[in-house]
Amino acid sequence: MSEIQFYTGENIPLELHKVRIVQKLDLVPVERRAEAINEAGNNTFLLKNKDIFLDMLTDSGVNAMSDRQLAAMMIADDSYAGSATFTRLTDKLEEIFGTKYFLPSHQGRAAENILAMTFVRKGSIIPMNYHFTTTKAHITRLGGYVEEVVIDEGIKITSDHPFKGNFDLGKLKRVFEEKGDRIPFVRIEAGTNLIGGQPLSLENIEAVADMTHSYGKLVVMDASLLQDNLYFIKTREESAKNLSIREITKRISAKMDIIYFSARKLGFARGGGIAIHDEKLYLKMRELVPMFEGFLTYGGMSVREMEAMTVGLEETMDMDVISQGPLFIKYMTDELVKLGVPVVTPAGGLGCHLDATRFIPQVKQEEYPAGALAAAVYIAGGIRGMERGTISEQREEDGSEHLASVELLRLALPRRVFTLSQVKYAIDRIKWLYDHRDLIGGLRFTEEPSSLRFFFGRLSPTSAWQEKLVKAFRNDFKESL
């Protein structure tokens, strides 16, 4: 990675790319933003793009592709079967991960579906450092259970632990000893999404794999956020500092039985798949691909996206590429810390995460503070983030609310998409909102799906707090109507 210093002493991240194509953005007035969020049922997923200025909902499928990726799309082989595009992708995965077999899928959750249908049975227990929404939904749909064994530091909002996504090995051992006969595999999530994109150390990954294999169980990695995790291992783990990104990747993949990923994140394309070392495991899952995805050489993906993915995976081995996300996220996080805004520390991957519990302590968890904060940030700046709290959970079997361990608003920074001035604008509007945080109230459901409710549930404010927020904004800002 390039080490660049500014003569003035200013400490800011530097874009290691140039912009060749631009897309116009519109910043609609605050009054329209308040209307738009209510039309969307106070669910940022339901906002229309025309009403959004900075879209920080996710980095999934919205990262900027490189010139080499776009060029590669022009050589795609669109043969239904036996495509040369598929061969190039499989060869690249074997080069990077050392896997001999690959099952393509249209995205990461499709890969999760195949894994769950193959290995999860009623009563199965899947230990993991921390759950992800769709992963848990696939497992529970089939009668399985998730057992989270992340270290205690993982759910501490403010911390200096460099690897908050690590497994607690003592907890994992107890799960094996008490429930081992019900465990088909252990899932390792690189760049643990729901607790702030927090990484695992190489040492912890290898220790978890060794323990799991000692009990005769499979090790499965969700590598969707692997690129950020690779960066953190390289920069934070002393024993890995002299290893190349390729060497770290090989060390990790050598310990895995199965690696699955969303290429909407890993590789900067759109698609996904399952990379496998063992032929028996490959054959066990193979029949589900043509049944639910597409033929074995495209799996529901566009071959053009597959060519882009192949190049993107190669670019993931470049520190100058994978450093961009973590560096800009760290800048945003550090600046908000300076301003007293409560955020998850240390800065992880994927995005900057606001701590809604401390940001708006007056909002009870049953009134969804992370969702309320998402609505407020949108009103304040036209910035769309994603609720990662209790709304992202699902109710217990008896209908009671399952309160999340953390209430976070994720502000994702898609790679190579936003400029530094746009990040500074987001910081400015969040600081303004924090100074007016007493105006923010809660939300309640008006339309609540039984699962994955954060995608399309609808809510309304518990009071007239949004009108008060708009009025305060108008008093301080003279943006044109």
Image (cartoon, rainbow, N blue to C red):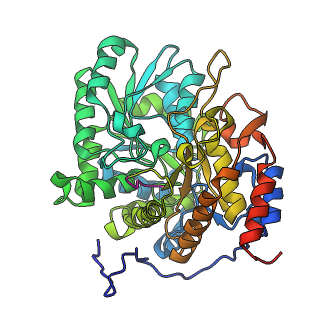
Instruction: Give, as a single range, the part of the protein colored magenta.
Output: 346-350
Is 2 displayed left or right of 154 in the figure? left
**Residue 448, percent across and down?**
75, 32
Along the line of sight, the residue nearer the viewer: 448 or 23: 448
- Count the labels in the image: 0
Q: Residue 418: in sight, yes or no?
A: no
Residue 206 location, quadrant = top left
Residue 239 in percent (x, y) is at 16, 52
Residue at image point 62% right, 66% down: 429
As drawn, 463 above or below 366: below
Please give the name of the residue rendered at 39% of the width and 19% of the height, measured from the top-left corner: 183
Quadrant (top left/top right/bottom left/bottom right) for the C terminus = bottom right
Residue 286 placed where, x, y %?
Answer: 48, 34
Q: Is residue 328 left or right of residue 257?
A: right
The quadrant of the image that shows the N terminus is bottom left
Residue 230 painted magenta: no
The answer to which image quadrant residue 320 occupies is bottom left
Instruction: From this view, report whether residue 26 is shown above or below residue 97.
Output: below
Q: Does 416 sit above or below residue 102?
A: below
The answer to whether any part of residue 333 appears in the image is yes
The quarter of the displayed image where residue 176 is located: top left
Depth check, front residue: 228 or 30? 30
Picture residue at 56% right of the left edge, 23% below the top: 140
